[in-house]
Amino acid sequence: MSEKRVILSLDITDEPSALRLAEQLEGEIFAIKIGLASIIVNGGKYIRDMSSYAKVICDFKSADIPKTNAQIAQKALEYNAWGIIVQAFTGKDAIKASVDVSDRLKVFSLVSMTHEGASYFIDKHVEEMAKISIEAGVYGIVAPGNRPETLAKVRKLVGEKKIISPGIGVQGGDPITAIKNGSDYVIIGRTIYESKDPLGTVKEINRAISAVIR
């Protein structure tokens, strides 16, 4: 079976509902991305509970001094997170602090975002942030799937680094277009968990992606 390319963005704070969906989609997704809101409501154990069904990427967008970034990464690892997302704009030392926590924790550095406001500051420094992210030793990069030109630019900048892409579905991005422009994995939330048939929706996305990457 080919590797799944869908990361479920599970922005459901009700843990029983979230766990039921995770169980339903087990084996059909590459990973589950969970954010701060879910952790605030359910505590760190939410990470461990989710990891029973798929790899868990903590979307904390850590953006602090090196010591604090390292503390956040360490706690995520202790609760069995597979990966963590950090902001690149804080600098190479802050990114590297998360990377240095453990080889077991995959650090993804965010160099551009999906919303219009990214054009004011973040997008003006994509090249610089990609460069320092690579120098810091990140496992992968976060780049927007709903902005193909930016995504393609990031792919050229980061070479073979893994790219995960949000902005698919409700925010206008298409999974096939994202894959063709450099994404390794597409991050999809509401399109899946608000669907009347989440499992069928994921399977259809998987089939479409498989046809492209063969």
Image (cartoon, rainbow, N blue to C red):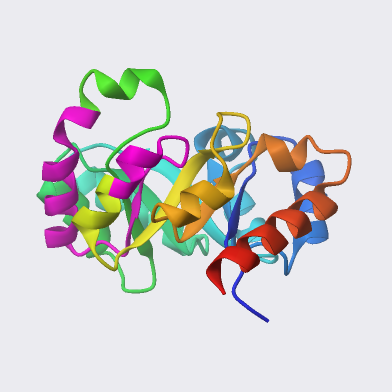
Of 169 and 192, the residue lying toward us: 169
Residue 17, position as x, y percentages in the image: 81, 42
Magenta stretch prevailing secondary structure: helix
Q: Is residue 12 visible?
A: no
Q: Residue at x 66, y 57 (%)?
A: 50
Residue numbers of the magenta segment: 123-152
- Depicted 194 relative to depicted 16: above or below: above
Q: Quadrant of the N terminus?
A: bottom right
Of 72 and 198, the residue lying toward us: 198
Q: Residue at x 31, y 37 (%)?
A: 112
Q: Quadrant of the C terminus?
A: bottom right
Q: Is residue 171 visible?
A: yes
Of 147 and 122, the residue lying toward us: 147
Please identify the quarter of the rendering in which residue 123 is found. top left
- Depicted 57 relative to depicted 2: above or below: above
Q: Is residue 199 left or right of residue 101?
A: right
Q: Residue at x 23, y 58 (%)?
A: 158
Of 54 and 198, the residue lying toward us: 198
Q: Residue furthest right?
A: 196
Please identify the quarter of the rendering in which residue 76 is found. bottom left
Residue 35 part of the magenta segment: no
Residue 25, position as x, y percentages in the image: 77, 59
Residue 151 part of the magenta segment: yes
Q: Residue at x 48, y 48 (%)?
A: 178
